[in-house]
Amino acid sequence: MSGTIAAIGDQALLDGFRLAGVSVFPGSTDEEILRAWTALPTTTAIVILTPRSAHTLEPVMADPRSPMTVVLPA
């Protein structure tokens, strides 16, 4: 599988993923989270989400063209 891996959500929860080469898009408000989703590179294959981000992005993740998402446990 080719493509990049990204993460969206609270920076404090996601900073460790940077060590593995994940592109982190911080966001703590609905607006920041939605802006981060739209800023994802077109090569993004997987997006790691915090539970808050997953809740905010639920409507847009239903699009079958969206990248695969993984939600961190609460």
Image (spheres, grey):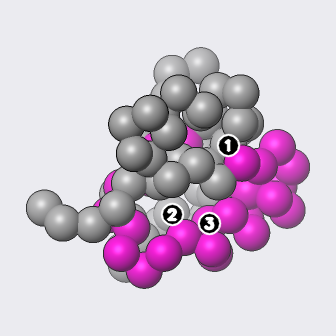
Distance from the alpha carbon under mark 2 to that under mark 1? 15 Å
Q: Residues within 10 Å of mark 1 (few under 14, many from 20)?
A: many
Q: Earlier in the sequence, mark 2 or mark 3?
A: 3
Say if mark 2 contacts mark 3, CB within 8 Å: no
- 10 Å crowding of disc 2: few (<14), some (14-19), many (20+): some
Callout in the foreground (2, 1): 1
Give the CA distance from mark 1 to mark 3: 10 Å
**Left or right of residue 20, residue 48 in this image:** right
Nearer mark to the viewer, of 2 and 3: 3
Which span is picked out in magenta?
26-49
Regarding mark 1 in the picture, which secondary structure is present there?
strand
Residue at the spot x=37%, y=36% of the render?
20
The residue that label 1 is drawn on is 9
Q: What amino acid is found at the position of numbered circle 2 in the picture? A: Met
Q: Residue at x 58, y 49 (%)?
A: 24
Sequence-wise, the earlier of marks 2 and 1 is 1
What residue is shown at x 68% (from left), y 64% (from top)?
36
**Residue type (three-letter) at the residue carrying disc 1:** Gly
- Left/right of residue 46 with respect to residue 47 in the rendered view: left
Check the picture and name the quadrant holding the C terminus.
Answer: top right
Tell me how far mark 2 sits from mark 3, CA to CA: 10 Å
Please name the residue that numbered disc 2 is placed on.
61
Residue 21 in magenta stretch: no
Q: Secondary structure at mark 2?
A: helix
Answer with the quarter of the image where residue 43 lies.
bottom left
Are there few (<14), some (14-19), or many (20+) residues within 10 Å of tag 3? many
Of pointers 1 and 3, the one earlier in the residue sequence: 1
Vertical relation: 48 (above or below) 44: above
Residue 4 place in picture, x, y as percent: 34, 61
Reading the image, the residue beneath label 3 is: 37
Q: Give above or below for 22 relative to 40.
A: above
For the N terminus, the image quarter is bottom left
